[in-house]
Image: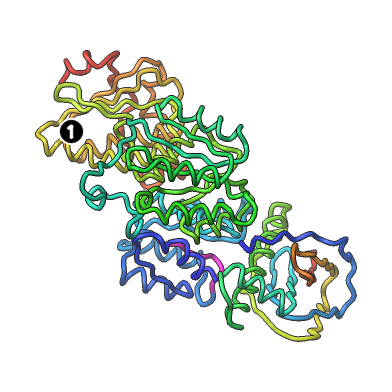
Amino acid sequence: MIHTLINKGFAPYDVQMFFASNGAEGLEMATNEKPDVILLDVTMPVMDGVECLGKLKADPALKDIPVIMLTAEAGKENVLKIAKMGVRDYIVKPFTEANVVDRVSRLVDLKHKGPAATEASSAGPGKKQKSVTEALKILVVDEHPAIIESIEKAVSKRGWKVVGCASPTEAAAEVASSVPAENTPDIILVSLAYPNKAALSFYATVRSNPALSRVPIMGLCVKTATFEQNNAKDTGFVGSITKPLDLKELPDRLIRAMDLDNTPLFCSMDENALVISLPEDLSEIGSLDLVRYSRARLSGLVNSGHDKLILDLTGVKKFEIPLLRAIACILIEAKALDIDWRIVGSDDDIFTLPTLIASNQKVAAFKDIKNPFEGQTTLDIHPDRAAAKKTF
Amino acid sequence: MAGITATPGSGISKAPQPSSLVGVTGSIGLSGKVSGIVYTAFSYALAQKVAEKILGGSSSEQEVSDVVAELTNMITGNLKSQLCDMGYNCSLSIPSVVRGDDIQVSAKTASISVRNEYTLEGCPDLLVVQVFAALET
Protein backbone atom coordinates (compact mmCIF):
# COMPACT_ATOMS: atom_id res chain seq x y z
CA MET A 1 0.00 0.00 0.00
CA ILE A 2 2.76 2.43 0.93
CA HIS A 3 4.60 1.66 -2.33
CA THR A 4 1.44 2.38 -4.33
CA LEU A 5 0.73 5.66 -2.56
CA ILE A 6 4.24 6.94 -2.90
CA ASN A 7 4.49 5.88 -6.53
CA LYS A 8 1.29 7.82 -7.25
CA GLY A 9 2.57 10.86 -5.41
CA PHE A 10 5.71 11.11 -7.50
CA ALA A 11 4.05 10.18 -10.81
CA PRO A 12 4.00 13.80 -12.07
CA TYR A 13 7.72 14.21 -11.42
CA ASP A 14 10.80 13.24 -13.36
CA VAL A 15 12.13 10.74 -10.81
CA GLN A 16 13.22 7.11 -10.79
CA MET A 17 11.64 5.06 -8.01
CA PHE A 18 13.01 1.88 -6.44
CA PHE A 19 10.93 -0.13 -3.97
CA ALA A 20 12.03 -2.71 -1.39
CA SER A 21 9.79 -4.78 0.88
CA ASN A 22 12.05 -5.05 3.88
CA GLY A 23 15.15 -3.50 5.36
CA ALA A 24 17.56 -6.11 4.04
CA GLU A 25 16.29 -5.70 0.48
CA GLY A 26 16.39 -1.94 0.95
CA LEU A 27 20.04 -1.98 2.02
CA GLU A 28 21.01 -4.00 -1.03
CA MET A 29 19.05 -1.69 -3.30
CA ALA A 30 20.61 1.42 -1.74
CA THR A 31 24.09 -0.04 -2.27
CA ASN A 32 23.39 -0.82 -5.92
CA GLU A 33 21.39 2.25 -6.90
CA LYS A 34 22.77 5.04 -4.63
CA PRO A 35 19.47 6.95 -4.45
CA ASP A 36 19.28 10.68 -3.74
CA VAL A 37 16.73 10.17 -0.96
CA ILE A 38 15.56 7.14 1.01
CA LEU A 39 12.02 6.88 2.36
CA LEU A 40 12.25 4.26 5.11
CA ASP A 41 9.29 2.66 6.83
CA VAL A 42 9.77 1.57 10.42
CA THR A 43 7.52 -1.49 10.40
CA MET A 44 8.90 -4.11 8.05
CA PRO A 45 9.56 -7.85 8.21
CA VAL A 46 13.04 -9.43 8.07
CA MET A 47 14.78 -6.17 9.04
CA ASP A 48 12.84 -3.23 10.42
CA GLY A 49 13.44 0.40 9.61
CA VAL A 50 15.40 1.20 12.75
CA GLU A 51 17.90 -1.60 12.16
CA CYS A 52 18.13 -0.69 8.49
CA LEU A 53 18.80 2.95 9.38
CA GLY A 54 21.59 1.91 11.71
CA LYS A 55 23.25 -0.09 8.93
CA LEU A 56 22.85 2.75 6.44
CA LYS A 57 24.54 5.18 8.80
CA ALA A 58 27.35 2.72 9.49
CA ASP A 59 28.19 2.34 5.80
CA PRO A 60 30.53 5.09 4.55
CA ALA A 61 29.11 4.75 1.05
CA LEU A 62 25.52 5.21 2.20
CA LYS A 63 25.62 7.32 5.35
CA ASP A 64 25.23 10.66 3.60
CA ILE A 65 22.08 9.70 1.70
CA PRO A 66 19.28 11.65 3.40
CA VAL A 67 16.66 9.41 5.00
CA ILE A 68 13.04 10.32 5.69
CA MET A 69 11.46 7.90 8.14
CA LEU A 70 7.84 6.82 7.80
CA THR A 71 6.34 5.86 11.12
CA ALA A 72 2.93 5.16 12.60
CA GLU A 73 4.14 6.38 15.98
CA ALA A 74 4.10 10.08 16.75
CA GLY A 75 5.09 9.76 20.40
CA LYS A 76 7.92 11.88 21.80
CA GLU A 77 10.14 8.94 22.65
CA ASN A 78 9.94 7.45 19.18
CA VAL A 79 10.57 10.78 17.48
CA LEU A 80 13.60 11.50 19.64
CA LYS A 81 14.96 8.02 19.08
CA ILE A 82 14.88 8.24 15.30
CA ALA A 83 16.03 11.87 15.27
CA LYS A 84 19.14 10.84 17.21
CA MET A 85 19.91 8.18 14.62
CA GLY A 86 20.35 10.85 11.99
CA VAL A 87 17.19 10.96 9.90
CA ARG A 88 16.71 14.18 7.94
CA ASP A 89 12.98 14.15 8.46
CA TYR A 90 10.12 11.90 9.49
CA ILE A 91 6.51 11.59 8.40
CA VAL A 92 3.83 10.19 10.68
CA LYS A 93 1.18 8.00 9.12
CA PRO A 94 -1.40 8.53 7.85
CA PHE A 95 0.13 10.87 5.32
CA THR A 96 -0.96 12.29 2.00
CA GLU A 97 1.00 11.96 -1.21
CA ALA A 98 1.39 15.75 -1.11
CA ASN A 99 3.06 15.50 2.33
CA VAL A 100 5.66 13.07 1.06
CA VAL A 101 6.38 15.03 -2.09
CA ASP A 102 6.70 18.23 -0.09
CA ARG A 103 9.19 16.70 2.34
CA VAL A 104 11.28 15.13 -0.41
CA SER A 105 11.27 18.39 -2.36
CA ARG A 106 12.97 20.02 0.62
CA LEU A 107 15.93 17.72 0.09
CA VAL A 108 16.18 17.34 -3.67
CA ASP A 109 15.09 19.28 -6.74
CA LEU A 110 11.90 17.82 -8.13
CA LYS A 111 11.12 18.63 -11.73
CA HIS A 112 7.75 18.02 -13.31
CA LYS A 113 7.50 15.69 -16.23
CA GLY A 114 6.32 16.76 -19.69
CA PRO A 115 4.56 20.04 -20.47
CA ALA A 116 4.06 21.01 -16.80
CA ALA A 117 7.83 21.60 -16.51
CA THR A 118 8.70 25.24 -16.66
CA GLU A 119 12.08 24.88 -18.30
CA ALA A 120 12.77 27.96 -20.37
CA SER A 121 13.88 25.84 -23.30
CA SER A 122 10.50 24.16 -23.52
CA ALA A 123 8.58 27.41 -23.21
CA GLY A 124 8.36 27.77 -26.96
CA PRO A 125 9.39 30.62 -29.20
CA GLY A 126 8.53 34.08 -27.97
CA LYS A 127 7.44 33.01 -24.45
CA LYS A 128 9.81 34.36 -21.80
CA GLN A 129 10.41 32.61 -18.50
CA LYS A 130 8.86 34.81 -15.83
CA SER A 131 10.83 36.29 -12.93
CA VAL A 132 9.72 36.70 -9.31
CA THR A 133 10.34 40.42 -9.58
CA GLU A 134 7.75 40.84 -12.32
CA ALA A 135 4.11 41.69 -11.71
CA LEU A 136 2.97 38.06 -11.58
CA LYS A 137 -0.73 37.38 -11.85
CA ILE A 138 -2.47 35.03 -9.45
CA LEU A 139 -6.00 33.85 -10.11
CA VAL A 140 -7.76 32.87 -6.88
CA VAL A 141 -11.02 30.98 -7.08
CA ASP A 142 -12.61 30.82 -3.65
CA GLU A 143 -16.10 31.28 -2.32
CA HIS A 144 -14.79 33.33 0.61
CA PRO A 145 -13.86 36.98 -0.13
CA ALA A 146 -11.74 37.00 3.04
CA ILE A 147 -9.44 34.35 1.57
CA ILE A 148 -8.97 36.35 -1.62
CA GLU A 149 -8.24 39.48 0.44
CA SER A 150 -5.74 37.62 2.63
CA ILE A 151 -3.87 36.37 -0.41
CA GLU A 152 -3.85 39.87 -1.92
CA LYS A 153 -2.40 41.23 1.30
CA ALA A 154 0.24 38.47 1.50
CA VAL A 155 1.60 39.10 -2.00
CA SER A 156 1.08 42.86 -2.20
CA LYS A 157 4.64 43.73 -1.21
CA ARG A 158 5.90 41.59 -4.09
CA GLY A 159 3.93 43.70 -6.55
CA TRP A 160 1.93 40.69 -7.74
CA LYS A 161 -1.65 41.07 -8.94
CA VAL A 162 -4.48 38.95 -7.58
CA VAL A 163 -7.66 38.39 -9.57
CA GLY A 164 -10.43 36.87 -7.45
CA CYS A 165 -13.38 34.81 -8.64
CA ALA A 166 -16.14 33.48 -6.43
CA SER A 167 -16.86 30.37 -8.47
CA PRO A 168 -15.25 28.08 -11.03
CA THR A 169 -17.81 29.27 -13.61
CA GLU A 170 -16.72 32.87 -13.15
CA ALA A 171 -13.09 31.79 -13.21
CA ALA A 172 -13.54 29.83 -16.45
CA ALA A 173 -14.85 33.00 -18.11
CA GLU A 174 -11.93 34.96 -16.66
CA VAL A 175 -9.27 32.61 -18.01
CA ALA A 176 -10.99 32.41 -21.40
CA SER A 177 -10.85 36.19 -21.67
CA SER A 178 -7.26 36.35 -20.45
CA VAL A 179 -5.77 34.72 -23.54
CA PRO A 180 -3.48 35.83 -25.33
CA ALA A 181 -0.51 34.85 -23.24
CA GLU A 182 0.44 38.20 -21.74
CA ASN A 183 -2.79 38.31 -19.75
CA THR A 184 -2.94 34.70 -18.58
CA PRO A 185 -2.47 33.97 -14.89
CA ASP A 186 0.94 32.72 -13.79
CA ILE A 187 -0.62 30.47 -11.18
CA ILE A 188 -4.16 29.50 -10.23
CA LEU A 189 -5.42 28.71 -6.74
CA VAL A 190 -8.83 27.07 -6.54
CA SER A 191 -10.87 26.02 -3.55
CA LEU A 192 -11.41 22.27 -3.35
CA ALA A 193 -14.58 22.80 -1.31
CA TYR A 194 -16.89 23.49 -4.25
CA PRO A 195 -19.57 20.79 -4.57
CA ASN A 196 -19.72 18.19 -7.32
CA LYS A 197 -15.93 18.25 -7.82
CA ALA A 198 -16.25 21.60 -9.55
CA ALA A 199 -12.58 22.33 -8.86
CA LEU A 200 -11.56 19.25 -10.81
CA SER A 201 -13.87 20.17 -13.70
CA PHE A 202 -12.35 23.65 -13.68
CA TYR A 203 -8.91 22.05 -13.90
CA ALA A 204 -9.98 20.16 -17.00
CA THR A 205 -11.36 23.36 -18.53
CA VAL A 206 -8.08 25.18 -17.95
CA ARG A 207 -6.00 22.32 -19.33
CA SER A 208 -8.13 22.08 -22.45
CA ASN A 209 -6.77 25.50 -23.46
CA PRO A 210 -3.29 25.06 -24.98
CA ALA A 211 -2.33 28.59 -23.89
CA LEU A 212 -2.82 27.56 -20.27
CA SER A 213 -1.27 24.09 -20.36
CA ARG A 214 1.75 25.10 -18.27
CA VAL A 215 0.01 27.22 -15.66
CA PRO A 216 0.42 25.49 -12.28
CA ILE A 217 -2.83 24.94 -10.41
CA MET A 218 -2.98 24.50 -6.64
CA GLY A 219 -5.88 23.60 -4.39
CA LEU A 220 -7.08 25.57 -1.38
CA CYS A 221 -8.63 23.55 1.42
CA VAL A 222 -8.65 22.88 5.14
CA LYS A 223 -5.86 20.68 6.50
CA THR A 224 -8.10 17.71 7.16
CA ALA A 225 -9.52 17.57 3.63
CA THR A 226 -7.09 14.79 2.72
CA PHE A 227 -9.52 13.06 0.37
CA GLU A 228 -9.96 16.26 -1.65
CA GLN A 229 -6.20 16.89 -1.64
CA ASN A 230 -5.52 13.37 -2.89
CA ASN A 231 -8.13 13.70 -5.65
CA ALA A 232 -6.67 17.02 -6.69
CA LYS A 233 -3.17 15.58 -6.78
CA ASP A 234 -4.32 12.61 -8.82
CA THR A 235 -5.97 15.03 -11.25
CA GLY A 236 -2.78 17.01 -11.78
CA PHE A 237 -2.80 19.84 -9.23
CA VAL A 238 0.80 20.58 -8.26
CA GLY A 239 -0.17 20.70 -4.60
CA SER A 240 -2.53 22.18 -2.04
CA ILE A 241 -2.35 25.15 0.28
CA THR A 242 -4.17 24.47 3.51
CA LYS A 243 -6.23 26.88 5.53
CA PRO A 244 -5.71 28.74 7.79
CA LEU A 245 -3.24 30.28 5.36
CA ASP A 246 0.34 30.82 6.47
CA LEU A 247 0.58 34.27 4.93
CA LYS A 248 4.29 34.64 5.69
CA GLU A 249 5.13 31.50 3.76
CA LEU A 250 2.48 31.83 1.04
CA PRO A 251 4.48 33.91 -1.49
CA ASP A 252 7.38 31.45 -1.25
CA ARG A 253 5.07 28.48 -1.74
CA LEU A 254 3.70 30.11 -4.87
CA ILE A 255 7.21 30.81 -6.14
CA ARG A 256 8.07 27.16 -5.65
CA ALA A 257 4.88 26.00 -7.38
CA MET A 258 5.73 28.22 -10.34
CA ASP A 259 9.23 26.68 -10.31
CA LEU A 260 10.82 30.13 -10.23
CA ASP A 261 14.26 31.09 -9.08
CA ASN A 262 13.80 33.24 -5.98
CA THR A 263 17.32 34.71 -5.90
CA PRO A 264 16.30 37.88 -7.81
CA LEU A 265 14.47 38.88 -4.63
CA PHE A 266 17.70 38.82 -2.69
CA CYS A 267 20.62 39.20 -5.13
CA SER A 268 22.11 42.14 -6.98
CA MET A 269 25.49 43.14 -8.33
CA ASP A 270 27.29 46.07 -6.75
CA GLU A 271 30.15 46.76 -9.16
CA ASN A 272 32.09 43.52 -9.08
CA ALA A 273 30.57 42.05 -5.91
CA LEU A 274 27.47 39.90 -5.64
CA VAL A 275 25.25 41.21 -2.87
CA ILE A 276 22.79 38.86 -1.18
CA SER A 277 20.42 40.77 1.10
CA LEU A 278 18.64 38.48 3.51
CA PRO A 279 15.43 39.50 5.27
CA GLU A 280 14.69 38.70 8.89
CA ASP A 281 11.40 37.02 8.00
CA LEU A 282 12.82 34.44 5.60
CA SER A 283 10.41 31.51 5.52
CA GLU A 284 11.39 27.86 5.69
CA ILE A 285 10.54 27.29 2.02
CA GLY A 286 12.13 30.57 0.97
CA SER A 287 15.32 29.59 2.77
CA LEU A 288 15.48 26.13 1.17
CA ASP A 289 14.89 27.50 -2.32
CA LEU A 290 17.34 30.36 -1.83
CA VAL A 291 20.05 27.90 -0.81
CA ARG A 292 19.24 25.73 -3.83
CA TYR A 293 19.31 28.55 -6.38
CA SER A 294 22.14 30.55 -4.85
CA ARG A 295 24.57 27.72 -5.67
CA ALA A 296 24.05 28.48 -9.36
CA ARG A 297 24.39 32.21 -8.68
CA LEU A 298 27.69 31.78 -6.90
CA SER A 299 29.03 29.47 -9.61
CA GLY A 300 27.92 32.01 -12.20
CA LEU A 301 29.74 34.75 -10.31
CA VAL A 302 33.01 32.85 -10.43
CA ASN A 303 32.47 31.81 -14.07
CA SER A 304 32.10 35.46 -15.02
CA GLY A 305 35.44 36.32 -13.43
CA HIS A 306 34.28 37.76 -10.11
CA ASP A 307 34.98 36.44 -6.65
CA LYS A 308 33.45 38.82 -4.12
CA LEU A 309 30.31 38.33 -2.06
CA ILE A 310 28.61 40.69 0.38
CA LEU A 311 26.04 39.14 2.67
CA ASP A 312 23.84 42.05 3.72
CA LEU A 313 21.97 41.49 6.96
CA THR A 314 21.07 45.14 7.54
CA GLY A 315 17.93 45.41 9.59
CA VAL A 316 18.00 41.82 10.81
CA LYS A 317 17.46 41.75 14.55
CA LYS A 318 16.30 38.19 15.07
CA PHE A 319 18.07 35.13 13.70
CA GLU A 320 15.61 32.30 13.25
CA ILE A 321 16.50 28.87 11.91
CA PRO A 322 15.60 29.43 8.20
CA LEU A 323 17.78 32.55 8.09
CA LEU A 324 20.68 30.93 9.96
CA ARG A 325 20.57 27.96 7.63
CA ALA A 326 20.60 30.20 4.54
CA ILE A 327 23.58 32.14 5.91
CA ALA A 328 25.49 28.94 6.72
CA CYS A 329 24.82 27.27 3.35
CA ILE A 330 25.63 30.35 1.27
CA LEU A 331 28.92 30.94 3.07
CA ILE A 332 29.92 27.28 2.87
CA GLU A 333 29.29 27.34 -0.89
CA ALA A 334 31.23 30.61 -1.18
CA LYS A 335 34.17 29.09 0.68
CA ALA A 336 34.12 26.02 -1.56
CA LEU A 337 34.36 28.31 -4.61
CA ASP A 338 37.13 30.45 -3.04
CA ILE A 339 34.84 33.48 -3.04
CA ASP A 340 35.93 36.29 -0.72
CA TRP A 341 33.00 37.29 1.49
CA ARG A 342 32.05 40.03 3.88
CA ILE A 343 29.06 40.49 6.18
CA VAL A 344 27.17 43.75 6.53
CA GLY A 345 24.86 44.35 9.45
CA SER A 346 23.88 46.68 12.22
CA ASP A 347 22.39 44.72 15.11
CA ASP A 348 24.55 43.69 18.07
CA ASP A 349 23.43 40.06 17.86
CA ILE A 350 25.01 39.69 14.46
CA PHE A 351 28.44 39.48 16.06
CA THR A 352 27.37 36.25 17.72
CA LEU A 353 26.52 34.49 14.43
CA PRO A 354 29.30 31.88 14.88
CA THR A 355 27.92 30.98 18.32
CA LEU A 356 24.31 31.04 17.12
CA ILE A 357 25.05 28.59 14.33
CA ALA A 358 27.22 26.38 16.55
CA SER A 359 24.51 26.18 19.20
CA ASN A 360 21.94 25.12 16.57
CA GLN A 361 24.10 22.43 14.99
CA LYS A 362 22.05 19.69 16.64
CA VAL A 363 18.78 21.04 15.26
CA ALA A 364 17.37 18.90 12.45
CA ALA A 365 17.58 21.81 10.01
CA PHE A 366 21.37 21.90 10.46
CA LYS A 367 22.01 18.20 10.21
CA ASP A 368 24.82 17.66 7.69
CA ILE A 369 25.46 21.41 7.34
CA LYS A 370 28.90 22.52 8.43
CA ASN A 371 29.44 25.64 10.46
CA PRO A 372 31.13 28.18 8.13
CA PHE A 373 32.54 29.92 11.18
CA GLU A 374 34.15 26.80 12.63
CA GLY A 375 36.64 27.84 15.26
CA GLN A 376 35.49 31.45 15.23
CA THR A 377 33.66 33.00 18.13
CA THR A 378 33.62 36.52 16.66
CA LEU A 379 33.75 37.92 13.17
CA ASP A 380 34.18 41.22 11.37
CA ILE A 381 30.90 42.96 10.63
CA HIS A 382 30.78 46.03 8.41
CA PRO A 383 28.26 48.80 8.95
CA ASP A 384 27.41 49.19 5.26
CA ARG A 385 28.33 47.88 1.80
CA ALA A 386 30.77 50.70 1.06
CA ALA A 387 32.77 49.87 4.16
CA ALA A 388 32.70 46.16 3.26
CA LYS A 389 33.87 46.83 -0.31
CA LYS A 390 36.86 48.84 0.91
CA THR A 391 38.20 45.78 2.70
CA PHE A 392 38.34 43.57 -0.40
CA MET B 1 -5.70 8.67 3.70
CA ALA B 2 -9.02 7.00 3.00
CA GLY B 3 -10.90 10.24 3.45
CA ILE B 4 -13.58 8.61 5.61
CA THR B 5 -14.52 9.98 9.03
CA ALA B 6 -14.81 7.36 11.78
CA THR B 7 -16.98 8.05 14.83
CA PRO B 8 -16.47 5.88 17.91
CA GLY B 9 -19.36 4.27 19.70
CA SER B 10 -19.64 4.22 23.47
CA GLY B 11 -17.33 1.22 23.67
CA ILE B 12 -17.32 -1.85 25.91
CA SER B 13 -14.80 -1.60 28.73
CA LYS B 14 -15.04 -5.28 29.69
CA ALA B 15 -15.59 -7.07 26.42
CA PRO B 16 -16.39 -10.76 26.84
CA GLN B 17 -13.85 -13.45 26.02
CA PRO B 18 -13.84 -14.96 23.55
CA SER B 19 -15.15 -12.24 21.27
CA SER B 20 -16.22 -12.72 17.69
CA LEU B 21 -14.80 -10.73 14.81
CA VAL B 22 -16.01 -10.85 11.24
CA GLY B 23 -14.38 -10.11 7.95
CA VAL B 24 -10.83 -9.00 7.16
CA THR B 25 -9.08 -8.65 10.51
CA GLY B 26 -5.66 -7.20 11.17
CA SER B 27 -3.78 -7.88 14.37
CA ILE B 28 -0.65 -6.52 16.00
CA GLY B 29 1.02 -7.67 19.22
CA LEU B 30 2.25 -5.36 21.95
CA SER B 31 5.15 -6.27 24.22
CA GLY B 32 6.89 -4.46 27.02
CA LYS B 33 5.31 -2.64 29.94
CA VAL B 34 2.05 -3.29 28.16
CA SER B 35 1.63 -6.67 26.52
CA GLY B 36 -1.32 -7.70 24.45
CA ILE B 37 -2.85 -7.68 21.04
CA VAL B 38 -4.89 -5.21 18.98
CA TYR B 39 -7.44 -6.41 16.43
CA THR B 40 -9.12 -4.27 13.76
CA ALA B 41 -11.98 -5.98 11.96
CA PHE B 42 -13.36 -4.70 8.65
CA SER B 43 -16.31 -6.35 6.93
CA TYR B 44 -15.38 -7.70 3.48
CA ALA B 45 -17.30 -4.86 1.81
CA LEU B 46 -15.78 -2.21 4.05
CA ALA B 47 -12.26 -3.51 3.55
CA GLN B 48 -12.76 -3.48 -0.22
CA LYS B 49 -14.19 0.05 -0.15
CA VAL B 50 -11.38 1.44 1.99
CA ALA B 51 -8.72 -0.23 -0.15
CA GLU B 52 -10.25 1.20 -3.31
CA LYS B 53 -10.34 4.69 -1.80
CA ILE B 54 -6.72 4.54 -0.73
CA LEU B 55 -5.26 2.77 -3.74
CA GLY B 56 -7.52 4.49 -6.26
CA GLY B 57 -9.18 1.65 -8.11
CA SER B 58 -10.42 -1.92 -7.71
CA SER B 59 -8.16 -3.96 -5.46
CA SER B 60 -7.18 -7.61 -5.31
CA GLU B 61 -7.62 -9.69 -2.16
CA GLN B 62 -3.90 -9.36 -1.45
CA GLU B 63 -4.04 -5.58 -1.84
CA VAL B 64 -7.05 -5.40 0.50
CA SER B 65 -5.16 -7.44 3.11
CA ASP B 66 -2.16 -5.16 2.68
CA VAL B 67 -4.31 -2.06 3.29
CA VAL B 68 -5.92 -3.61 6.38
CA ALA B 69 -2.47 -4.53 7.72
CA GLU B 70 -1.22 -0.99 7.23
CA LEU B 71 -4.31 0.61 8.78
CA THR B 72 -3.95 -1.74 11.76
CA ASN B 73 -0.34 -0.60 12.02
CA MET B 74 -1.39 3.07 12.08
CA ILE B 75 -4.15 2.55 14.62
CA THR B 76 -1.89 0.52 16.90
CA GLY B 77 0.99 2.94 16.36
CA ASN B 78 -1.20 5.77 17.58
CA LEU B 79 -2.18 3.72 20.61
CA LYS B 80 1.45 2.85 21.31
CA SER B 81 2.47 6.54 21.13
CA GLN B 82 -0.08 7.41 23.75
CA LEU B 83 0.91 4.48 25.96
CA CYS B 84 4.60 5.38 25.73
CA ASP B 85 3.88 9.02 26.54
CA MET B 86 2.08 7.74 29.68
CA GLY B 87 5.14 5.74 30.66
CA TYR B 88 4.01 2.35 29.34
CA ASN B 89 6.79 1.69 26.86
CA CYS B 90 6.17 -1.14 24.48
CA SER B 91 7.02 -2.33 21.03
CA LEU B 92 4.83 -3.61 18.21
CA SER B 93 4.96 -6.74 16.14
CA ILE B 94 4.55 -6.86 12.37
CA PRO B 95 0.82 -6.83 11.48
CA SER B 96 -0.89 -9.97 10.28
CA VAL B 97 -4.28 -10.38 8.60
CA VAL B 98 -6.87 -13.17 8.82
CA ARG B 99 -10.25 -13.57 7.13
CA GLY B 100 -13.30 -15.29 8.46
CA ASP B 101 -16.99 -15.04 9.24
CA ASP B 102 -16.59 -15.84 12.93
CA ILE B 103 -13.06 -15.27 14.17
CA GLN B 104 -13.00 -16.10 17.86
CA VAL B 105 -10.39 -14.08 19.77
CA SER B 106 -9.34 -14.18 23.39
CA ALA B 107 -6.24 -13.64 25.53
CA LYS B 108 -5.88 -15.74 28.65
CA THR B 109 -3.54 -13.42 30.54
CA ALA B 110 -5.26 -10.17 29.59
CA SER B 111 -6.66 -8.17 32.46
CA ILE B 112 -7.86 -5.53 30.00
CA SER B 113 -10.38 -6.38 27.30
CA VAL B 114 -11.91 -3.40 25.50
CA ARG B 115 -13.88 -3.15 22.28
CA ASN B 116 -15.29 -0.28 20.27
CA GLU B 117 -17.32 -0.11 17.11
CA TYR B 118 -16.80 2.84 14.79
CA THR B 119 -19.41 4.12 12.37
CA LEU B 120 -17.90 5.27 9.12
CA GLU B 121 -19.22 8.16 7.07
CA GLY B 122 -20.97 6.86 3.99
CA CYS B 123 -20.59 3.18 4.96
CA PRO B 124 -23.23 0.91 6.49
CA ASP B 125 -20.67 -1.42 8.09
CA LEU B 126 -18.83 -0.86 11.34
CA LEU B 127 -15.11 -0.99 12.01
CA VAL B 128 -14.45 -3.01 15.18
CA VAL B 129 -11.35 -2.46 17.26
CA GLN B 130 -10.67 -4.91 20.07
CA VAL B 131 -7.74 -4.75 22.48
CA PHE B 132 -6.56 -7.38 24.96
CA ALA B 133 -3.79 -6.19 27.24
CA ALA B 134 -2.03 -6.59 30.54
CA LEU B 135 0.18 -4.11 32.35
CA GLU B 136 3.56 -5.18 33.70
CA THR B 137 3.47 -5.63 37.44
Secondary structure beneath dot 1 equals loop
User: Residue A213: image x %, image y %?
Assistant: 37, 53
Asked whether residue A57 is in view, the answer is yes
Q: Chain for mark 1?
A: A
**Residue A281 percent location from the top left of the image:** 45, 28
Give the position of the N terminus of chain A as an image quadrant.
bottom right
Counting from the top left corner in percent of width and height, residue B45 is at: 71, 78
- Look at the image and tell me in which quarter the C terminus of chain A lies: top left
Residue for point 39% across, 56% down = A66
In this view, the residue in front, B102 or A201, is: A201
Q: Crowdedness of circle 1 by 10 Å Cα count: few (<14), some, many (20+)?
A: many
The residue carrying mark 1 is A339
Q: How many marks?
A: 1
Check the image and report above or below for A265 versus B90.
above
Q: Which percent across, then down, holds residue A346?
A: 36, 15
Region of the chain picked out in magenta, as a range: A38-44
Residue A41 is covered by the magenta coloring: yes
- What residue is rendered at 36% in x and 56% in y? A112
Figure quadrant of residue A335? top left
Q: Return the residue found at the far left.
A: A305
Q: Amino acid at mark 1?
A: Ile
Task: Identify which residue is drawn at 59% across, 46% down.
Answer: A221
